[in-house]
Image: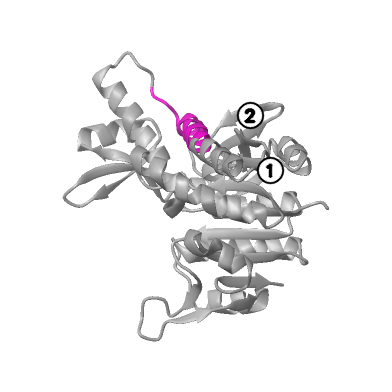
Amino acid sequence: MKKKKAVVSLGHEALGYTTTEQWDAVKKTAKALADLSQSDYQLTITHSNGPQVSMIHKAMTELRRVNPGYTPVPMCVCSAMSQGYVGYDIQNSLRSELLGRGISTPVSTVLTQVTVDPYDEAFYEPNKIIGRYMTKEEADVEISKGNYVTEEQGKGFRRIVAAPKPLDIVEIDTIRTLADAGQVVIACGGGGIPVIEQQHILKGASAVIEKDSIAGKLAMDLHADLLIILTSVEQVYLHYGTKNQESIHTMTVSEAKHHIAGKQFGQGDMLPKIEAAIAYLEKIPEGKVIITSIAHALEALKGKTGTVITI
């Protein structure tokens, strides 16, 4: 019997914030992913990379500062580096966990590019902070190169980049071929490497892509039966963080839009996840979305917890 397809989106909690934290975190994450795989789902996994790509950017910037002979490393290359090493850790941990359970399903990582619109409004109003703190002089150099910076009072200046919407996943045919063969695929890490298509040439963009947006897009393109968004909370809540906090067990797309209009979901945390769920379900109306934490993934799949969103 052919397995159903599930796209799994991993947040920061699944990976940790440093290299050593990641080694420990992915072992726990691998157990949750293996549970899902054993529940008769073919998994295509995407993940966040905020701390990782920021760490790489800081390291490469510092290398250039200490050794002026080194050329600057663009954001697209930092994104590619983060995809490689995060995918490597997830891939090896999950392979080991599956083999320990007597499952020989191949696990692979696909270095993934995602096209963006060069005229996306996000390029004119960048809001993603990356990299180390800079002096005023260093910030002026960045500005002279056409980059954006922001000042954090009392701390210094940091670079900010755009977060455009994804258009197309360049390697989607490769990802689909592996998924159709029943393999576990890790793809579109950190939202994918943002590129701008110029005729037949792909050029890296100084940007990052929201991993929730790409998770929804990936689930659409694969015609997945299920989109699982794993985050830091067990369920989606109304009036989150207040004495009137209320968990949501099930929600329709229309109800989700109503709650968005009522500003129930935080711009930098739950809102992108709900928007990704809506985009996926409007394209694949027979699909289903589950939002929960890593620790409760299997229970949520069984309907015991989590938030389920349907059309």
Mark 2, residues whose alpha carbon is within 10 Å: few (<14), some, or many (≥20)?
some
166, 308: nearer the viewer: 308
Q: Which residue is mark 1?
A: 168
Report which quarter residue 36 is drawn in. Answer: bottom right
Contact between marks 1 and 2 (CB within 8 A): the answer is: no
What residue occupies the far left of the structure in this picture? 154
Whether the magenta-drawn stretch holds residue 85 is answered as yes
- Residue 293 position within the rendered picture, expressed as x and y whole percent measured from the top left: 49, 62
Q: Is residue 69 left or right of residue 10?
A: left
Residue at (49%, 43%) from the top-left corner? 208
In this view, 158 is above or below 289 = above
Rendered image quadrant of residue 168: top right
Measured from the top left, where is residue 99 in percent x and y? 60, 40
Task: Indicate the amino acid at tag 2.
Answer: Leu
- Is residue 249 shown left or right of residue 226? left
Pinpoint residue 196: horizontal percent, then vertical percent.
61, 35
Answer with mark 1 or mark 2, whichever residue precedes in sequence.
1
What residue is shown with label 2? 202
Dot 1 amino acid type? Asp
What's the residue at 65%, 47% (across, down)? 44
Residue 210 visible? The answer is no
Q: Identify whether 296 is placed above or below 115.
A: below
- Viewer-proximal residue among 16 and 68: 16
What's the coloring here? one colour
Residue 17 part of the magenta segment: no
Quick check: 44 above or below 39?
above
State how far apart marks 1 and 2 are (Cα): 12 Å
* The magenta segment: 72-88
Q: Main secondary structure of the magenta part?
A: helix
Mark 1 burial class by Cα count in 10 Å: few <14, some 14-19, many 20+? some
